[in-house]
Amino acid sequence: MKSTAQALPATAADLPAPNRWGNRIFEGMTMLSVVILGVCFVCAAYVLVEGAWLAIHTYGWSFLTSQQWNPVTENFGALPFIFGTVVSAAIALLIAVPLSIGTAIFLTDLAPLWMRQPLTSVIEMLAAVPSVIWGLWGLFVLMPWLHDHPYTWLNKHFGSIPIFGGPIEGSGSCIMSAGIIVAIMILPIVTSVSREILRAVPDLQREAAYGLGATRWEVTRIAVLSYARRGLLGAAVLGLGRALGETMAVTMVVGNSPKIHASLLQPGWTLASVIANQFGEASDDLQRSVLFEIGLVLVGVTIVVNIGALILIKSIETPGTRRA
Amino acid sequence: MMKKLLISSLLVGLLTLTGHAADTVALTGSGSTFVKPVMDKWASTYSTSVDPTVKINYAGGGSGTGQKNILDGTVDFAGSDGPMSDAQLKSAPTPILHLPVVAGAVVIIYNVPGVTGLKLDGPTLANIFLGNITKWNDPAIVAQNPGVTLPDLDISTVHRSDGSGTTYIFTDYLSNVSPAWQSTVGKKTSVAWPGGVGQQGSAGVSAQVQKTTGGIGYVELIYALSNKISFADVKNAAGNYITASLGGVSTALATATIPADFRFSYVNAPGDASYPISGVTWLLVPQQSKDPVKGTKLVAFIKWIYTDPSAQAMAAKLNYAPIPPAVVTRVLAAVDTIKN
């Protein structure tokens, strides 16, 4: 037992070690990158906590549960923003993930070869469109259309269901619009990551399924999707991260109203966009501090949601191999 | 000998260096974005044609930023659309002067198909933004607009989602004309709006109103004038419906009672032709400057703004309402109290 344990490193040591210094420098550099990243995170966290200290001290835990947002009486609570952030991100994921995976399947398995590269390029180009452009397009084109057609229709026929209740304010500025805009914005990243993951599914898997006489749909379902599902969930988590923090486009379509409505067709507000909106004019120390605490809450929400997603991914086992 | 020479040459070098630094004085300011266009114009004109030794940089950033920076002493002057509070002034290491530098107004924009020349009074506006009046054909609106056919249309209110001097002036006015507004909402650069949709900046509010059938919102007069957006006539304290104009703002300012520290509001001012939703932007300047050289240059710059005809012409060209001469005299007396 002992002799084999000693024998193994001995064979490794037998190998010539041409460049130990190079190895050390390489190790040192990678370590340094990690340290720099860690220091950046700690510094950012410190600045947030220090800035938020006054607000934390003033409101305590009730800050997380209060629905008040009144700069005049200095009553502040984060709940409407937490609600708006989580709900709009959830809508975005519900729309973007199925669309992205569908697109990715089409691009890897179904589309004719000549079409794949141009289509991929077009989708990846969408990722380069700046946030503010999406916001303007949303405000001037998408929102009025959504308001006049789907929203009015939903409200008319399904208005008794609280999530489609009225009255519809503004020209379609609401949580739903924010979710839809963010969905469009995260489509490219989720699609390209999903595509890479589907491409990594070994062709052997597909061939085996075809060999068993599976139809195209069955091959996709059994051999491709179930093999890649952990990776696809990972792609969704990437999209989620972006959805939670999206600011400029959201603020233009969400209605910027610090209230919790059951209806998705009524205005709301998100954590990131309230900071962007009010930081410049926050004249007194307490209001500034409150916005720092909102930033801290956003970090907290992001961490909690990501941990939840990781647990979900871990709980799914990948058949065959533990890759992906 | 050699050592002595080295030291003396070093000294000479240092002297020239500091001497050179004293040649140009950099003055920095921050705050109100409302006043930034004219401030930039003044700053560049002043250093090119009046005093080339002064470089003035006005960073904007919002009134709140300006107030914070002047309290921290990180800028030499600030611009603010709202006055600083007593508590803030008490926390300042040296007294801070409020100097009204330009005046502005807030106008009501609306989007009701087929309706132009809308007339509104203060209580009606307050009730619309409180959510008590929800339809365009509400009796309160119809009564003020004889001969206008108002549709049975929902009113959608639009307000600023960012903190803003425009919001300060508008909520100051609503608090003045409506006790209900004062007790439930109050006035500040951002408030807890009873309802409606928020948008960032005058551009955002105006885009939202344009896209919302039945929408109503408020923007700066300058923004509405330069973008040729039509706005409602508002009833003033004398009972006349006034279309906002720079003249109407100056008239209102001339009839206002202004206290010695210049922290005043003149919404709903008396005077037949006064436009009621008006306010001023202040320059915030420490009464005791930390650096005598900078202080002297700053006082000279401020005096130039108030007294030079070309400086005043620049403001008028950019659609700012001027400060009336009687007020300017008082401001200049206050500027003379700045100690260097």
Image (tube, coloured by chain):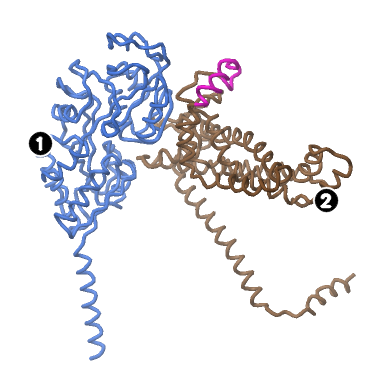
Chain colours: A brown, B blue
Instruction: State the residue in front, A116 or A42.
Output: A116
Residue type indicated by callout 1: Pro
Residue type indicated by callout 2: Leu
State the quadrant of the C terminus of chain B. Answer: bottom left
Look at 21% across and 73% down and name the residue there: B16
Chain that bears disc 1: B
Q: Which mark is residue A260?
A: none
Q: Tell me: residue B142, above or below residue B28.
A: above
* Residue A159 image point, x, y percent: 57, 16
Would you say B62 lies left or right of B213 here?
left
Instruction: State the residue in front, B267 or B107.
Output: B107
* Residue A318 image point, x, y percent: 79, 46
Magenta stretch: dominant secondary structure: helix
Category of crowding for the residue at label 1, using alpha-carbon neighbours closer than 10 angstroms: few (below 14), some (14–19), many (at least 20): few
Q: Which mark is residue A204?
A: 2
Category of crowding for the residue at label 2, using alpha-carbon neighbours closer than 10 angstroms: few (below 14), some (14–19), many (at least 20): few
List the residue tagged with mark 1: B325
Look at 33% across and 41% down and name the residue there: B64
Whether discs 2 and 1 lie on one chain: the answer is no
- Quarter residue B202 falls in: top left
Q: Which residues are magenta?
A: A145-164
* Residue A321 image point, x, y percent: 81, 51
State the quadrant of the N terminus of chain B. Answer: bottom left
